[in-house]
Image (cartoon, rainbow, N blue to C red):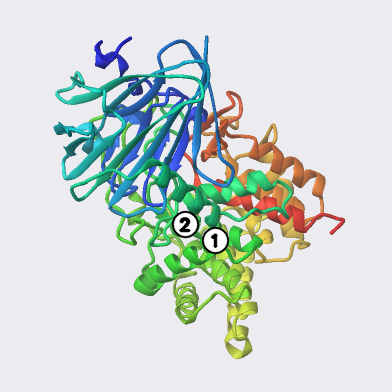
Amino acid sequence: MSAAGDAKALLTGNVPHVLREYSLLADGERGIVVGPRGDFAWMCFPHWDSGAIFSSLIGGQGTYAVTPSSRYVWGGYYEPGSLIWHSRWVTEDATIECREALAMPSSPDRAVILRRVLAVRGTARVSVVLSPRADYGEAPLRGLRRSDAGQWTGRLGDTHLSWAGGEAASDQPDGHSGRALVQDLQLDAGTHHDLVLVLSGEPVSETPDPDWAWEGTEAQWADAVPSFADTVAPPAARHAYTVLSGLTGSSGGMVAAATTSLPEHARGGRNYDYRYAWIRDQCYAGGAVAKSGPHPLMDDAVRFVADRLLDDGPELKPAYTIAGGPVPDQRHLALPGYPGASDIIGNWVNQQFQLDAFGEALLLFSAAARHDHLDADGWRAAETAVAAIEQRWQETDSDAGIWEIDPDAWTHSRLICAAGLRQIATSGPGGEQGAQWVSLADQIVSDTAEHALHPSGRWQRSPGDPTVDAALLLAGIRGAIDASDPRTLATLHAVESELVQDGYCYRFRPDQRPLGEAEGAFLLCGFWMALAYAQQGDHVSAARWFERNRAACGSPGLCSEEFDVDQHQLRGNLPQAFVHALLLECAVMQFSQRPDQ
């Protein structure tokens, strides 16, 4: 098909892919989800939670595709220690790659998207389509102009666009009352062609030189990501850190995932907007990084969480925008959604209280303090978290808990607060204040044991819910009670016997159906199992859990929240930050606890 042909037929992004085939480009301020046809299926601008300009992932219009013109098979890979992605296609007579990235360093109100088409072998023939539409597809590209030098400019609502490399592109209708730029490229073996797209809140006078932009991006990633050589899986640990870095903005806030509305179970009514910074997830990430060293992502997490605590105290919200603002109310768009789900933006978590966030914050602050990276504001935030626990831990009808469900006196929330109190007491100034914090932890554990200990000797979910929950593993892992405590061992054995299928772990049993019918396995819980067994000295089981769960990803190495054990498919939003955080922690912790160390 030529560029003079039907542009609508080239807008391939409207057909979604299974989640394991998507890769991610990110610069901390926003991200792009890339499909195997070289189609940009999702991007919000200027921020993670702004309106999308490429939204085909959930049924909207707008795409930016670089696709071979003939039959092909797809693959791809990241350059180590970066989110520089190579889409790779083998056609009948050529091998083609498209090297792509969001340029670094990033800017909150400006994005530079780099795409370099390479003819690796043979003559490369690709079709290029640029047809962005702002506000989830509602606002088409307007005011297109081509300069004498071949640079295109235009507007997407309030966003200014400039595109270089499309000198031979033709301006065509996109079939939806908008415009599309369409171009055919033919490259001889060993050559390349650069495409540079700039999005900005201000008019763009010129696009950056691609060689200069690539060099800066490579250098920025090289400086940002440690080697993690002293782990059991250096490439996996490094990639996990890279993903977390790509999801973390200049504010220090880290979004829980790059996407919204991707279903945890087809037609199960469980799809959410995760383009916000959850306090708990931020603490998981910062604490995992701290296990390796005082790397920048630990400081970012401390800064973001401390600021929220100092601002909101005992009214701390479970989640914020990446800028620290309130999460908007949940609402629907007029889009079809990803198959099996509806379209949702905003999140009702903004109406919840989650007690465990204070305990997780204390665990994060204590980890930073052990590296001597907790400043005066950090200590004030820690004292604020302790005061909030003192004030609110006995509330029985307000805590939505780790899984954000109906309020209850959730056992996990209380025990993680006790763990945080113990850890910060050992890292703090000690004396009478430290003794008081330990005493409060003892009181919480004692009260919880009186009301939420199952007759079998394990922890149960709440005083009124006798079932087991994988989150209860954290009582031993994080130090609310000893690893050798009979309650720790009984809980581990109960989770293993009741919540595990084929080497994957579920959160809890929501009803009487078999595991997997209500939702997928939670990869987060699988990594907790690895940590729990490593803590017990069973390194064979720990390694088995680690390897099993880190393999539950697509070829780009991105993990979603859940894994469908029967179909071997990713479920939920992508990539899920806390899964990558626990993957990183497992890689570091298993090395440090190997018997020969």
User: Is 11 or 509 nearer to us in this picture?
Assistant: 11
Image coords of residue 145 (percent x, y): 15, 32
Image coords of residue 246 (percent x, y): 46, 49
Query: Furthest residue to the left?
Result: 143
Q: Callout 2, which amino acid?
A: Asp
The picture quadrant where one finds residue 428 is: bottom right
Query: Furthest residue to the right?
Result: 596
Q: Quadrant of the N terminus?
A: top left
Residue 95 visible: yes
Using the image, determine if residue 293 lies above or below residue 435: above
Question: Position of 550 compared to 334: left or right?
Answer: right
User: Is 162 or 158 nearer to us in this picture?
Assistant: 162
Mark found first going from the N terminus, 1 or 2? 1
Question: Position of 8 compared to 543: left or right?
Answer: left
Using the image, determine if residue 317 lies above or below residue 506: below
The residue that disc 1 covers is 286
Which label was assigned to residue 408? 2
Residue 413 visible: no
Of badges 1 and 2, the one in the foreground is: 1
Q: Quadrant of the C terminus?
A: bottom right
Question: Position of 391 compared to 581: left or right?
Answer: left
Image coords of residue 497 (percent x, y): 72, 40
Using the image, determine if residue 502 lies above or below residue 92: below
Secondary element at image label 1: helix
Dot 2, crowdedness within 10 Å: few (<14), some or many (≥20)?
Answer: some
- Tell me the distance, in whole angstroms, between the alpha carbons under discs 1 and 2: 28 Å
User: Exactly how many numbered labels are in the figure?
Assistant: 2
Name the residue at 53% across, 67% down. 359
Q: Callout 1, which amino acid?
A: Gly
Which label was assigned to residue 277? none
Dot 1, crowdedness within 10 Å: few (<14), some or many (≥20)?
Answer: many
Name the residue at 50% across, 62% down. 356
